[in-house]
Image (cartoon, rainbow, N blue to C red):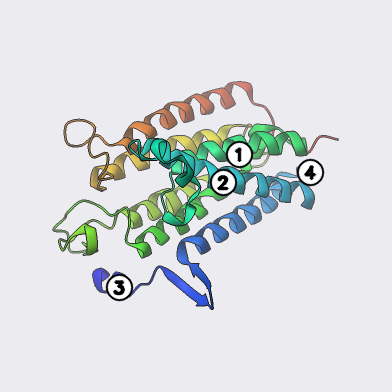
Amino acid sequence: MLDELYHAMDPVAFAIGPLTVRWYGIAYVLGFAFMCLVMWRLAKRWEIRLDEDALLTIVCCTIVGVIFGARIGYCLVYGNGYYLAHPVEILFFNQGGMSFHGGLCGALIGGVVAARLTGIPYLTLVDMGVIGAPIGLFFGRCANFINGELWGAVTDAPWGVVFGGSAGSMPRHPSQLYEALLEGVVLFIILFALSRKRPPRPRGTFTGVFFACYGVFRFLIEFVRQPDSQIGYLYGGWLTMGQVLSLPLIVLGIALIVYATARKLPQEGMRT
């Protein structure tokens, strides 16, 4: 049933004349929109100062950071040297190829700029952003499924999906949907539940939980996700680049949770 559903899906949502809108692009727009909404609601609940101009600045810095970080991260880590020989093609966003870990680094760098421009403490800003981030991850992974990319390993499970094309004719794990569930739905529920406490948990707590949980979820899903063909397995027929990149996130996440618990810095808004 899932394979029939997949084969009925078109990566293009709609086209108006020369304008073509893809589901992947819509996923990005929805992700940023929901992040903005979550941050606005959190500011009110946590009783911290955040005006419209500051929120717009944060979103713009995040968009630039995520898009360029995700693209550059993919080209450097997964490009297997191709983009070093063809550097101009790094800017060819329409050819696909975006990395979560690169996008995360870009978002964190964009957050530094946004924190300086708005006067919001950096960890407070990131804490608010990561609570809404899983919603964007959910939409993004669903778009990956629609595009028929980042599929899983061959499986005989009854929910296996035949993606066709370069994925072949064998049923595969719909690993994109596994990620949408764990990295999107489950992670959002965890962070949202933690955010309900008042006064809010110490600065850095939510960022630490996001890093640690995402790292664990991604590491586990990589066992049933097909690695990129240009890289393959790094060791023993099971270790992937995604797992290697997720390990530092787990360590950093735990370290941030310990730091936040020890320092107990309150969440704060814009400085006057």
Q: Amino acid at mark 3?
A: Leu
Q: Which mark is residue 191?
A: none
Q: Is residue 244 left or right of residue 127?
A: left
Question: CA–CA distance between discs 1 and 2?
Answer: 7 Å
Q: CA distance from mark 1 to mark 4?
A: 15 Å
Q: Quadrant of residue 240?
A: top left
Foreground of the two, 44 or 184? 184
Asked if one can make out residue 78 in the rendered structure from this viewpoint, the answer is yes
Residue positioned 70% across, 52% down in the render: 40
Q: Earlier in the sequence, mark 3 or mark 4?
A: 3
Q: Residues within 10 Å of mark 2 (few under 14, many from 20)?
A: many
The spot of residue 171 in percent (x, y) is: 18, 61
Q: Nearer the viewer, mark 3 or mark 1?
A: 3
Which quarter of the picture shows residue 78? top left
- Name the kind of residue labelled 2 in the image: Ile
Whole-Å distance between the Cαs marked 3 and 1?
A: 37 Å
**Regarding mark 2 in the picture, which secondary structure is present there?**
helix
The mark closer to the camera, 2 or 3, is: 3
Report the residue marked by disc 4: 49
Q: What residue lies at 51% left-to-right and 69% top-to-bottom?
A: 21
**Label at residue 5:** 3
